[in-house]
Image (cartoon, helix red, strand yellow):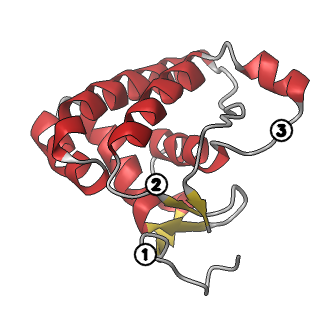
Amino acid sequence: MSCDAIRRGGAPIGRLEHLPTLEIAAVLHLRLWGKEREEDEAIELMTAAPWRAFEGLTYVLQNYWRRPLVRHSPNCACLGADEAAFAHFVSAAGTGEREDAMLLASLIVRPAGNLIAVNAAETFRLALLRAVAAGERQAPRTHHLASAQVH
């Protein structure tokens, strides 16, 4: 689907390249969630700490989200509204801005899942930060339970 075919949450609001590195990594994890990949690559990446933390976050999202998040394709330069909300949510949770993270979580998940989602996002951002510092490869593996819509 091209960027001009807009669905709720998929409206391009910026460019991915304008985000800080950790937020780009968070959006790329979101975009690759559920994508079919080579099985051996998926097994290799299964041990990556950011991906394990991301799977914990996606478990919470799937159980509490208000609606499936709309994602752009992995190679799209646009930044969608849902992706921006997700990136800012992960960033706020991981930098100790818990009140902001709770507010941003309310855009993504139902109230019962806010605190759980913030805790999972905090863990995910910390894993991303450690991986970037260590120079670890950031590409996530396949997650077959994903049902978020792809733009």
Instruction: Give the alpha-carbon distance from disc 2 to disc 1, as whole Å.
Output: 21 Å
Q: Nearer the viewer, residue 115 or 65?
A: 65
Farthest left residue in view: 99
State the SS at label 1.
loop
Q: Residues within 10 Å of mark 1 (few under 14, many from 20)?
A: few
Q: Which residue is mark 2?
A: 19
Residue type at the position of mark 2: Leu
The alpha-carbon separation of the residues under discs 3 and 1 comes to 27 Å
Question: Number of marks in the image?
Answer: 3
What residue is disc 3 on? 37
Image point 20% across, 51% down: which residue?
106
Quarter location, residue 73: bottom right
Q: Nearer the viewer, residue 58 or 11?
A: 58
Of callouts 2 and 1, which one flags the residue occurring earlier in the amino acid sequence?
1
Q: Is residue 75 above or below residue 103?
A: below
Q: Residues within 10 Å of mark 3 (few under 14, many from 20)?
A: few
Quick one: quadrant of the C terminus?
Answer: bottom right
- Quadrant of res 120: top left
Which is closer to the viewer, label 3 or label 2? Answer: 3
Residue 144 x %, y %: 68, 37
Q: Which residue lies under the disc numbered 1?
A: 8
Where is 77 relative to 8, above or below?
above
- The answer to whether 12 appears left or right of 97 in the picture is right
User: Which kind of residue does numbered mark 1 sit on?
Assistant: Arg
Describe the element under mark 2 as helix, strand or loop.
loop
Identify the amino acid type marked 3.
Arg
Asked whether the beta carbons under mark 3 and mark 1 sit within 8 Å of each other, the answer is: no
